[in-house]
Image (cartoon, rainbow, N blue to C red):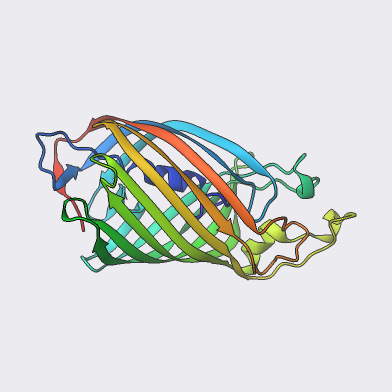
Amino acid sequence: MKHRPRIFIAIALAAKVWTAQGALAQTEPADTDPLWELGIGAFGLIAPDYPASGESSFNGLALPYGIYRGEVIRVDDEDGARVVPFDTPAYEISLSAGAAFGAQSEGRGVREGMPDLDPLLELGPQVIFRGPDFGPASRRGRIDFALQARVVASLDFNTGSAKYRGMVFEPEVEARWPDAFGAGTEIRASVGPVFATEALQAYFYEVEPKFARAGRPTYQSQGGYLGTDVVVSLSYDLTPRFTAFGGMSASSHAGAANRSSPLFEQELNGAAFFGIAVILAESQRRVKKRY
């Protein structure tokens, strides 16, 4: 899911923004990028524990990262980590992945006494239709349209196991505007609804009889509409190798399929993230920038 304040965005969004840095040395052609880059980054995210939760948590990570701009395998500033068998000026068909933090239930309001929410991993196909350009000729932006379907699994690091949690479907419109506020800046904004299968909705909203209590009756979840996400981010290349980034998101869950669940607390969620990334090494071989 591209929404990162819900449980699905955390790591994926931050990693995607990190790779937006890619500033080139003045001696390199402006239409090329290094084939690979290695660096280190850190980010923090404050976001709801799950969609429509009334509780929020802060999570952060500092870790090395890599960028690879291959013909088929890519980890880049276009859409994170993915396998791209088809790529044309008009569209891209690829297999992409995402991940997100989990959340504890102990001391967390309506989920008190229920199982913790484990970190989630998602994987599936996406189709990106490259839309129209906009803005001045010297700093053209672009609007893309994406359709995404992903299988979702929860990860239990204590046992080293994974469990299928359902599927998520996301149509999305995304605008990107490089050099929006001058050289080295980039604005990204996206909006789109999110739909999930009953299995995934159950992970967030279902209350089994053994977990029912006063104020938290048994509830059977259903699949369908989960919410609509709006995400806005800004990155700035402080130097050719050092980038700062941040952003905010809002999610509306009005009309969601499981708004009657006792675990559904509020229709509007918000989140914020920030971080830095530093390029430590890059390849001498360069590749032409893509569409």
Answer left or right for 217 relative to 53.
right
State the residue at coordinates (76%, 67%): 220
Q: Nearer the viewer, residue 201 or 270?
A: 270
Query: Is any part of residue 183 visible from this angle?
Result: yes
Answer left or right for 277 relative to 6.
left
Query: Is any part of residue 51 visible from this angle?
Result: no
Q: Nearer the viewer, residue 33 or 178?
A: 178
State the residue at coordinates (28%, 59%): 142
Compared with residue 144, is residue 274 higher up or lower down, i.e. above or below? above
Answer left or right for 229 relative to 63.
right
Q: Position of residue 260 (x, y in %)?
A: 75, 66
State the residue at coordinates (21%, 58%): 291
Q: Position of residue 67 (x, y in %)?
A: 30, 42
Q: Position of residue 208 (x, y in %)?
A: 80, 60
Q: Nearer the viewer, residue 228 or 170?
A: 228
Compared with residue 5, is residue 143 higher up or lower down, i.e. above or below? below
Q: Position of residue 113 (x, y in %)?
A: 81, 46
Q: How many numbered discs, if any?
A: 0
Give the quarter of the image for residue 278.
top left
State the residue at coordinates (71%, 60%): 205
Answer left or right for 16 relative to 264.
left
